[in-house]
Image (spheres, grey):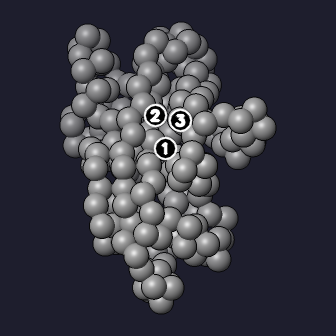
Amino acid sequence: MKIILASKSGVRKSILDKYNIKADVISSNVDEDEIKSSLLIENASPLTISKNLAEIKSIKISNKYPDRLVLGADSVVSLNDELINKPKSRKEALTILKKLNNSIHFLISSVCISKNGAMIWNHSDQSELKMKNLTDDELLSYLEKIETETLLNYGVYQIEAEGLKLFEYIKGDKDSIMGLPIKQIMNYIKQFRI
């Protein structure tokens, strides 16, 4: 039995592969910006937004494949309880990095497993990250090393690559920071003998 990963994230798929969890990838194609905007109007916290997005992605695909376990996931960055969105341009990426510069912020990774169109399990994991105090030139130099498509799809830093150099410290599970709290997922799906 394979699970379905309701995400087009290559990093999430590689984490599942690393832990020998077989998964078909079917992107949910939900409009994340629209959902975030709606939740922000209701003063939802970054944690609530992350949980909701993971659940919506999971349930959308679960409705199409009711007998399968569907894993939805979402990660958000929270600075002083403010949601930091993915940049829409390189200029915005620099603005975000300046905001995070020399600051402690949190990366929240939420996952949801659905079956028969309903959530059957969810989990959220929070990691603490402290960015170094970097000059504008250092931030620009970092951004020059990141492809625009990567930047816009995954956010301003990738812990598994150049982004690691931006940080004074990182407190949290590496797989969770990269998008999947895999240990908790594995503990849950053991009962299904996947």
Residue 117 higher or lower than 70, as above or below: above
Q: Where does residue 4 sit, x and y in percent of width and height?
A: 44, 28
Is residue 62 in sight in this rendering? yes
Q: Quadrant of the N terminus?
A: top left
Calculate the distance from the C-alpha at mark 3 to the C-alpha at mark 1: 9 Å
Q: Is residue 57 visible?
A: no
Q: Amino acid at mark 3?
A: Leu
Q: Residues within 10 Å of mark 1 (few under 14, many from 20)?
A: many
Q: Quadrant of residue 180?
A: top left
Is there a contact, CB below 8 Å, between mark 2 and mark 3?
A: yes
Say the numbered circle drawn on residue 110: 2
Q: Residues within 10 Å of mark 2 (few under 14, many from 20)?
A: many
Q: Is residue 141 above or below residue 148?
A: below
What residue is shown at x 49% (from left), y 74% (from top)?
Answer: 147
Q: x, y percentage for residue 167? A: 33, 67
Tell me the residue that label 3 is attached to: 47
Looking at the image, residue 7 sits to the left or right of residue 64; the answer is left
Instruction: Tell me the tag on residue 75.
Output: 1
